[in-house]
Amino acid sequence: MNVRIRPMTTDDVAGVDEQKMATFEAQDREEGREPELVPDDVHERNAARLHHQLGTDPDGCLVAVEGGRIVGHVVALLREYLWCLPMLHVHPESQSGGIGRRLLDAALDYGKDAEAGIIMASSDPRALRLYTTSGFVLHPAMEISGRVRHRPPAPVGVREGGDDDFGLTVEVDRRVRGVPHGANGNDVRFIRDLGSRFAVLDRGGERGYVLWREGRVVLLAATTEAVACELLRHVLAAVGDDDIDIWAVTGSQQWAIRTAYDAGLVLKPGGALLTRGRLGPMTPYLASGLYL
Ligand SMILES: CC(C)(COP(=O)(O)OP(=O)(O)OC[C@H]1O[C@@H](n2cnc3c(N)ncnc32)[C@H](O)[C@@H]1OP(=O)(O)O)[C@@H](O)C(=O)NCCC(=O)NCCS
């Protein structure tokens, strides 16, 4: 049957979530894990994110459809001159048949004038091949996970972020990533409004911010490693006893690896970050899976 690529619409949101969940379940089984029941609030958050992305980048959101059924989807975002790829998934029954390549090519076309790009890749060999053969430089990454066994003291000077602090995130992002997360830090605001906690450190010339929720450090950027370590320690001091995950920790983030080991967390290989073009130093930086 013919597979057609077409723009995603808000009517596709439930079908895209269903297809993504089927992809994750298959991935879990392949890696020897029994898939866990997905709570309703995860589906709600997924839907809210997709609606937000459809709102900011309607032409970057595409689905692959076969016989009326969604078998794949991709989401690409454009922020000034930066193109980001937060999502590319193909239904397990349709994988390895070229749909991933077609979706990626369409998403790249959406960013054809962008001077820079970022992708966070899973460990799927097909994903790694797709991105590296599309002109991206691969930075192998580790995943930090586990329970905080040695809780660090909460650093002095880190405070809860407020509505007046999105300007700080814009400034820090310009220094570290080159491009802010949305005009006026709107993506950062969206992440916070969706339930992440937001903290900042602003000490004269040194500044940074972090977003996290139970189980995950979502995004961290700072102008110095000292500030980045303090922000990460702030999170590790505040999280409960559940496991916490930090994705896409590349070799440039030795400060994060040291801080995580001090807290008794565990490191294991986990995918890659891929970049191309004119970016900032990308360190000290922990990229968000959905906004990179
Ligand atoms: C990664 C993914 C999106 C790729 O889509 P796909 O339709 O399965 O892949 P394609 O058939 O387009 O193949 C992609 C490339 O991998 C190669 N490939 C196909 N099967 C492969 C396999 N079993 N092992 C290694 N490479 C393989 C293809 O030759 C192709 O490269 P080419 O275009 O240069 O020939 C899809 O497999 C998927 O959803 N995986 C699980 C979720 C995931 O990890 N997503 C990526 C998030 S970053």
Image (tube, rainbow, N blue to C red):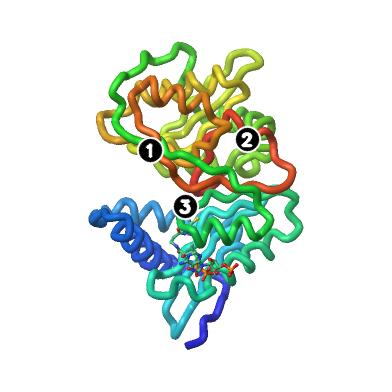
The answer to the question of whether label 3 and label 2 lie on touching residues, with beta carbons closer than 8 A, is no
Q: Nearer the viewer, residue 271 or 2?
A: 271
* Mark 3 lies within 8 Å of ligand 1 (Cβ measured): yes
Q: Amino acid at mark 1?
A: Asp
Q: Tell me which numbered mark, 2 or 1, is placed earlier along the sequence.
A: 1
Residue ID at (65%, 32%): 176
- Regarding residue 204, the answer to whether it shows in the image is yes
Check disc 1 and report its element: helix, strand or loop: loop
Residue ID at (64%, 39%): 180
Q: Residue furthest bottom?
A: 1
Rendered location of residue 220, percent (x, y): 52, 32
Question: Considering only vertical position in the picture, is 28 above or below 165?
Answer: below
Q: Mark 2 = which residue?
A: 282
- Determine whether, in the image, residue 112 is placed left or right of residue 138: right
Cα separation, mark 1 vs mark 3, equals: 14 Å
Rendered location of residue 152, percent (x, y): 36, 16
Residue ID at (62%, 55%): 132
Check disc 2 and report its element: helix, strand or loop: loop
The answer to the question of whether label 1 and label 3 lie on touching residues, with beta carbons closer than 8 A, is no
Q: What mark, if any, has residue 245 been given in the picture? A: 1
Q: Nearer the viewer, residue 277 or 43?
A: 277
Q: Mark 3 = which residue?
A: 122
Q: Amino acid at mark 2?
A: Met
Mark 2, other Cα within 10 Å: few <14 / some 14–19 / many ≥20: some
- Regarding residue 160, the answer to whether it shows in the image is no
